[in-house]
Image: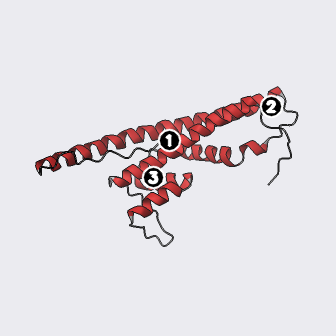
């Protein structure tokens, strides 16, 4: 590992573009968490964490805790095991995780900002923009999956509401938990 000895900070242009890309990365990660959490609560996606022995935890609190603490790669792996994703979607989501991890853990310290030329700054911004675009694509996929999941959970809620009304119970339906 090379430790960057640069004393200068990234330029405003680099910093702004980096911030926007990281915002998109967070949207992507939060979307994965939402899919697993909401799907698990409705029994559509079993989001229990596989343990080392191959057995899965059954406690709902374990699922919620695991979803909140899991790394992005593990969230995607869990989602891929539980729903079918077309290979091009899977490729985009996997690349987005690589981009997210690179941005979050290594990107800013890989450049020497002392004496940064305008051309080098432009190249760095271009790299950030390319990562942003892949993350944006991943967010669009996750949002489409969320929309589909929300439609299914709305149907479940309506069906349960009708059953409860038949039993004489009104306004029982808890409001859906909103997540980011």
x%, y% of residue 62?
44, 63
**Marks 1,2: beta carbons within 8 A:** no
User: Which residue appears at 14% of the width and 47% of the height?
Assistant: 165
Give the SS element for disc 2: helix
Q: Nearer the viewer, mark 3 or mark 1?
A: 3
- The residue tagged 2 is 120
Q: Nearer the viewer, mark 1 or mark 2?
A: 2
**Residue 111 sits in which quadrant?**
top right
User: Which residue appears at 22% of the width and 43% of the height?
Assistant: 158
- The residue tagged 3 is 79
Give the SS element for disc 3: helix
Tell me which numbered mark, 3 or 2, is placed earlier along the sequence.
3
**Residue 96 sits in which quadrant?**
top right
Q: Tell me how far mark 3 sits from mark 2, CA to CA.
A: 38 Å
Is 100 on the left-hand or right-hand side of 56? right
Q: Tell me how far mark 1 sits from mark 2, CA to CA.
A: 32 Å
x%, y% of residue 78?
47, 56
- For residue 88, the mark is 1
Is 81 on the left-hand or right-hand side of 128? left
Q: Residue furthest right?
A: 115
x%, y% of residue 142?
46, 41
Mark 1: few, some, or many residues within 10 Å (few <14, many ≥20)? few
User: Which residue appears at 21% of the width and 49% of the height?
Assistant: 160
Q: Tell me how far mark 3 sits from mark 1, CA to CA.
A: 15 Å
Give the vertical position of 130 relative to 153 (above or below): above
Tell me which numbered mark, 1 or 2, is placed earlier along the sequence.
1
């Amino acid at each position: 590992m090379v430790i960057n000895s640069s004393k200068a900070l990234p330029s405003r242009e680099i910093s702004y573009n980096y911030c926007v890309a990281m915002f998109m990365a967070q949207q992507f990660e939060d979307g994965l968490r939402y899919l697993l959490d909401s799907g698990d609560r409705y029994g559509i996606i079993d989001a229990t964490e596989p343990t080392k022995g191959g057995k899965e935890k059954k406690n709902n609190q374990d699922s919620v805790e695991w979803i909140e603490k899991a790394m992005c790669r593990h969230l995607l792996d869990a989602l891929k095991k539980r729903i079918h994703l077309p290979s091009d979607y899977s490729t985009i989501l996997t690349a987005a995780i690589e981009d997210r991890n690179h941005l979050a853990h290594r990107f800013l310290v890989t450049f020497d900002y002392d004496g940064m030329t305008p051309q080098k700054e432009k190249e760095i911004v271009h790299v950030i923009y390319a990562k942003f675009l892949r993350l944006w694509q991943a967010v669009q996929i996750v949002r489409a999956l969320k929309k589909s999941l929300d439609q299914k959970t709305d149907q479940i809620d309506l069906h349960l509401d009708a059953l409860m009304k038949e039993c004489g119970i009104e306004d029982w339906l808890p409001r859906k938990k909103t997540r980011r």
